Amino acid sequence: MKPARLWRLANANLSRELGALAVSAGGVALGIGCLVFFLALGRGVQRVVRDVFPVSARELEVVVPQVGVGSLFGEVRLDDATVARLRQVPGVAEAFPRLALRVPAVTRYNGLFFGREIRMGLEVVGVGISPDLIGGDARFPFVDAGEDKPIPVVVNRRLLEIYNKVFAPQRGLPTLTDSMLVGFQFPIELGRSYVAGKTLPGSYEASLRLAGFSDRAPLAGLSMPIETVRRINARFGQDSVGYSSVLLRAQRSEQVGEIASAVKRMGLDLDESERNRALQIGAAVELVTLALSLLAALITALAAVNIAQAFHAEVRERTREIGVMRAVGATRGDVATLILAEAAVTGICGGALGVALARLGGLLIDRVARNGLPQFPFKPDTFFDFRPSHVILGVVIAVAASLAGAFFPARAAAALDPARALSEG
Amino acid sequence: MSAIELRALRKRYPPREPGGAPQDLWRGLELTVGEGEFVAIEGQSGTGKSTLLHVVGGLDRAYEGEVLVLGERLRGLSDARLAALRHARIGFVFQSFNLLAELTALENVLLPDYFGDGVPDAERRAREGLARVGLADKASSRPMALSGGERQRVAIARALLSRPPLLLADEPTGNLDARTGEGIIDLFRELHRDGMTLLVVTHEVRVSRAASRVLVLREGALFPDPRLEGSA
C-alpha cells in the first residue's frame, strides 16, 4: 500500500470520525501538553538555579582543613610553594590563589549617588584575587598601584542584581547598570570596624575605584588585586604569606574527581558548600520534574487506553468495510497499516496540539509572573526553556502512545475473517 | 479451460450445542464453470449460496475439498497471494453495495487502486467505468446522494476497475426495484458478451434468465435447473 494512497484513505476515515478523533487526540494532547510543559519548566528552573548558583564543572576550591592533624601542627599552609605543588597535580590547568583582607574595613559615603543624596556606612569584606582570574572583565587596570592611588575593585555581577532587585527598591535608590558604575570611586577606611566598634592602630583612609564586574569574582565582598591585599595585611601585621584558598581549574571536567583526591592526599581540603548547594537544588528540581513528567506519562498512558477503546469500537463499526477492502484486494497487513496510520495521524494531531498547549500555558504563566510577582534577584523573563527537542519528543511520544493504543485493535482488524466481516458487519 | 472448479467441496459448521454433531452445509459440491460462462446459482436461504461465493473468492478458507479459480489452487495460496488474486482477477458485487460513505463515487470505484500495486491508469479507467454504467456525471457524488440502482452501478464499476476475468455477484438486484434491477441485468449481459465469466447468486428468476446456466443449491448439493437452463 503506497503512502499517498494510505494517507488519502486514512484521512477519509478520520474525517468521518472527527468526534472520536477529537476525543482521542484531546487525551493525547493533555498528556503531551503536561509532559512538554513540565520538561520545559524543569529546564527553565534549572537555568535559573545555574544563574543564581553558577558552578563550574571544571573548578574546585582548595582550603586549609579547619580541624586536622596537619593544621594542628602547622604543617599545611596555602603558600606559594603549595600553590606551585597544586599546579603540578595531573589534570590541573590553572591555579588562582585568593587572599582574604584580614583587617576590618568600612566605607562611608555621604553625598550625591546618581542623583540621590545618601548617607551610608558599610562594613567591607575584601578578597584579593589574581588578575588572571577575571581576565578582561576589568575595564581599568586591575593591579596594585601603590599606597596613594585608588584601589581597583571588581564586583560579582550577581551582587549588582541583588542591589537592583532588593537593596535599591528598599532604600529608594536608583537602579544601576555596569556602565554607570564602572569608574565610580568611593572612600574606604582600613583598620576600622563598625560592627566591632573598634579602630586598629594605624588605620587609614584610601579610595576604591570600581574597575568592572565579573562572574569570576567571589560573590561575597569586593575583589581587589591580590598584591594590594597582601600589602594591606602586611601593613597591619597580618599573615601576608599564606592564602585563604586556591581555585583550581581542571583541564577537563572528568578530571575533577582525581584532582580532588590528590588535593586531599596533600592534607588540604575542598570548600564544596556552594557547589553542594547548587547540586542539591538542581537535584531537587530534577526530582520534581521527573515526578511531574511521570504524572504526564501516566496521563499519556491513559490516553493510549482511550485510543485503544476508541479504535476497538471503530473496528467493530467498520467490520463490513474491512470485509469490502479485503474483497477488493487488501491484505491483512494493509488493514492493520490503515488502522495504525489513522492512529499515527491522531497522535500527530494530539502531539502538536499538546505542544501548542504547553507553549501557551508557559506564555500565560510567564505573563502572570511578570505582572503578578514582585521583583526579586535573578527573576527570569521566562521560567520555561522550550526547545525544538521538546516538540520532537512530544510528537514522537504522542505517536508512540497512539500506535501502542491502536496496536491490538489493528491486530484484531487484520485478523477479521473477511467472509464473516461481509456477512455480519 | 475452466474458470472455476470445485471438487468434493465440503463445509462444516461447529455443533450448535456442546456434544452435538457438526453441521454439514455441503456434502461434496462439484462444479465447473468455463471461461466466459454466466452461471446463476439459486437456492433457499441458508443453503450456503453467499458462502460459496466467498469460498470461490478466497474470502472463506474453512472448507474441505479442492477449489481452483483461474488456474490457481486456493488452498495453497498465502494471504498476500489471495489478496493479489482478488485485487487483479476477481471482481465482487454485493447485495448491499458496500460503498464507503465518506468517499465519492469516483473514489469508491478507485478503492482497489489503494491496495497492492494499485491499478494501472486507475483514474482514467474509473471514469470510463462510471461512464459505462451511466454515471459519468455522478463521479463527485457521495453514496448518500445516489439512488439504490446508482449505488449498485458504482459497486459494479468498482468491481470492474482491475478488468478482472471473473465477476462474483451476491444478490446484485436484491435491494433494487424491478426497473433498476433490469438495468443491472442488462449490464451483466453486456459483460458476458464481452467474455467475462460471471457467477451470480440470486433469488430472482429474471437474473437467472440472463444466465447461460442455472444451478440450484439444495440439501448440500448443486443441481441443474432444467426450467431456465439456456434461456438467455
Image (tube, coloured by chain):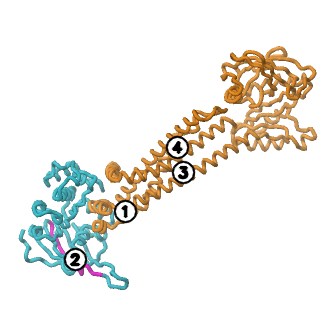
Q: Secondary structure at mark 4?
A: helix
Report crowding for label 4: few under 14, some 14 to 19, many 20 or more residues within 10 A (C-alpha): some
Judging from the image, mark 1 belongs to the subunit labelled: A
Magenta segment: B23-35
Mark closer to the observer (2, 3): 3
- Three-letter amino acid code at the position of disc 4: His
Residue at the disc numbered 2: B47
> Quick check: B181 left or right of A298?
left
Residue at the disc numbered 3: A296
The quadrant where residue A250 appears: top right
**Is residue A108 found inside the magenta-colored segment of the image?**
no
- Three-letter amino acid code at the position of disc 3: Ala
Task: Provide residue B217's location: percent of width, then percent of height.
Answer: 18, 77
**Which chain is the one coloured cyan?**
B
- Tell me if residue A197 can be seen: yes
Residue shown at the point (63%, 46%) measured from the top left: A286
Q: Earlier in the sequence, mark 3 or mark 4?
A: 3
**Which chain is the one coloured orange?**
A
Q: Secondary structure at mark 2?
A: loop
Residue shown at the point (73%, 15%) measured from the top left: A112
Task: Provide residue A305's location: percent of width, then percent of height.
Answer: 47, 58
Residues tagged by mark 4 and mark 1 found on one chain of the structure: yes
> Quick check: A353 left or right of A421?
right
Quarter occupied by the N terminus of chain B: bottom left
